[in-house]
Image (cartoon, grey):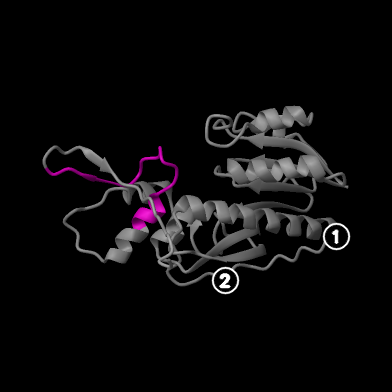
Amino acid sequence: MLRIICFVDHEIGYRILKSLLQTQSDIKIVAVVTTTDNATMWWPSVEKLCTHFSTPCFIYPDSKKTIINFGNIDYIFLLSWKHIIPKEIFNMPAKATINLHYSLLPKLKGVYPVNWAIIKGETYTGITFHVVDETIDGGPLLLQKKILIHSSDTARTLQLRLDDLAVKGFAELLEKAKKGSLCPIPQKEQQNQSYYTKKDYEKSNELDLNEITSVSKIINLIRGKTFLPENKSLYFRCPQTGSKCYIRLELDCSSDEK
């Protein structure tokens, strides 16, 4: 029986964890770790889910010392995890710490890869499960699945489709882990490979009304910045008042057929 710890954040982390708790009888979830955002964002409470299934749940980063004291762990799974965890934690498991990243690595390393895939005009993106090492999103690849980006996608609709892909991918990954058939493949670095930070994303939030660019780039930018209706990211400043005017996209892709 595999003994695992799950680091859980966002909808996909909650969704995969719930499936594990409900259906897996041949693994042991020793502990779940979540973030301070738990139950304050748009996904359900991870703590309540763990309480329902009598599974220990800890809040990161306050739980670092507690986590390090767990012994006899086969895998740690980082399920949409946004914090860099220290070496003493990701080296704990006997087999590996595995991260879920929403791009086809080595493309789009760093944060907001779903948004950047649209903004950069990528035709395809996907999900990657990879071994965690001291580099950021740079460890050996274990499993990838590819998806076409629709011209009608916003960051939100693409994220939801990637969630479905990640659920299928995780099930496949877990079966391989149980059989001991995971085969890590080193990443092949590409020339001029970009790594995106939170600062990069926030810097791209302001539109320059004096900049000349193509319509497609503007549409891609708006699509990539459109998430939940209440979110505010992309904006321009009103030349008359200096106030921020926020922009988001509502696409109506109805058929021309009568």
Q: Nearer the viewer, residue 81 or 213?
A: 213
Mark 1 closeness class: few <14, some 14–19, many ≥20 residues within 10 Å: few
| Image point (69%, 47%), residue name | 77
* Residue 8 showing in the rendered view: yes
Q: Quadrant of residue 192?
A: bottom left
SS of the residue at dot 1? helix
* Magenta stretch bounds: 221-239
Residue 169: where, in percent of width, then height?
69, 58
Quarter of the picture containing the C terminus is bottom left
In this view, the residue farthest toward the front is 258
Q: Which residue is mark 1?
A: 179
- Tag of residue 74: none
User: Residue tagged by mark 2?
Assistant: 188
Q: Is residue 111 visible?
A: no
Q: Secondary structure at mark 2?
A: loop
Which of the pair 96/101 is nearer the observer? 101
Q: Residue 119 placed where, x, y %?
A: 39, 59
| Side of 241 where 202 appears, left or right | right
Up/down of 57 relative to 95, above or below: above
Query: Which tag is nearer the camera, tag 1 or tag 2?
Result: 1
Q: Residue at (44%, 42%) from the top-left corner? A: 228
**Vertical arrangement, residue 127 with respect to residue 243, above or below:** below
| Residue situated in front as seen by the camera: 11 or 108 | 11
Please, what is the three-letter code of the amino acid marked with disc 1? Lys
Other residues around mark 2 within 10 Å, as few (<14) / some (14–19) / many (≥20): few
Question: Cβ–Cβ below 8 Å for labels 1 and 2?
Answer: no
Percent position (x, y) of residue 135? 56, 55
Which residue is at a point 52% across and 34% down the rendered structure image?
41
Q: Is residue 2 left or right of residue 98?
A: right
Q: Residue at point 80% right, 58% down?
A: 175
